[in-house]
Image (tube, rainbow, N blue to C red):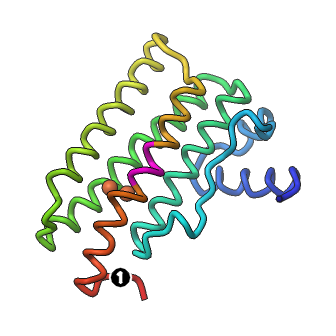
């Protein structure tokens, strides 16, 4: 288990990588206790495709940053920025996976695309509601994001990655 100061250090570095203002975040950050654990991009979540794995790690960074921003009652400006970042990066990531599916005639593409579409709608709705002040981020929403991404990676993306590996596209 990392010490809190080390976790602080890594967390602020992640903010830098995601182009989130470290100065704004630094004044708010208290690492979450036992109530909500951050996601960890560990070996169990790797699908062994270097491009897809790197993008999943960024998505997890966004979800963790969003969670910490929420736990620390960060300003609405910061919450919006992080949530918008998550929505935009999700679109980019899904586009990449969908291009892989198209290029290699992936047989389960329509079910995979449908799962992406449902999630795209869900987080767009969350963003819209938060922007209009009709909803706040909640532990339920954070748990949904964590759960959805974990299940999707383990059950759906892994299947795609195995297929791509058979097509000799796997990471070395
Ligand atoms: Fe996917
Ligand atoms: Fe994915």
Q: Nearer the viewer, residue 46 or 10?
A: 46
How far across and down, in percent of the image, does residue 5 sit? 88, 52
How far across and down, in percent of the image, does residue 62 sit? 55, 46
Location of the N terminus by quadrant is bottom right
Q: Residues within 10 Å of mark 1 (few under 14, many from 20)?
A: some
Location of the C terminus by quadrant is bottom left
**Residue at coordinates 19% horizontally, 65% vertically from top-left?**
101
Residue named by callout 1: 170
Residue 25, above or below 59: above
Ligand 1 position by quadrant: bottom left
Q: Is residue 118 left or right of residue 90?
A: left
Quarter of image, res 95: bottom left
Q: Nearer the viewer, residue 96 or 46?
A: 46
How far across and down, in percent of the image, does residue 34 sit? 77, 38
Residue 85, above or below 12: above
**Residue at coordinates 86% horizontally, 50% vertically from top-left?**
4
Q: Is residue 120 left or right of residue 66?
A: left
Magenta stretch bounds: 148-152
Q: Is residue 54 left or right of residue 164?
A: right
């Amino acid at each position: 288990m990392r010490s809190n100061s080390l976790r602080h250090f890594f967390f602020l570095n992640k903010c830098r990588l995601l182009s989130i203002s470290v100065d704004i975040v630094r004044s708010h950050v208290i690492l979450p206790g036992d109530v909500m654990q951050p996601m960890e991009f560990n070996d169990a979540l790797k699908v062994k495709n270097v491009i897809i794995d790197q993008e999943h790690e960024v998505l997890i960074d966004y979800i963790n940053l969003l969670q910490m921003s929420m736990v620390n009652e960060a300003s609405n400006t910061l919450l919006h920025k992080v949530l918008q970042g998550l929505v935009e990066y999700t679109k980019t990531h899904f586009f990449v996976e969908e291009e892989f599916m198209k290029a290699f005639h992936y047989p389960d593409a329509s079910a995979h695309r449908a799962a992406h579409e449902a999630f795209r709608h869900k987080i767009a709705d969350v963003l819209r509601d938060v922007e209009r002040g009709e909803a706040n981020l909640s532990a339920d929403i954070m748990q949904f994001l964590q759960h959805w991404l974990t299940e999707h990676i383990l059950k759906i993306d892994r299947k795609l990655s195995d297929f791509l590996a058979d097509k000799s596209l796997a990471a070395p």
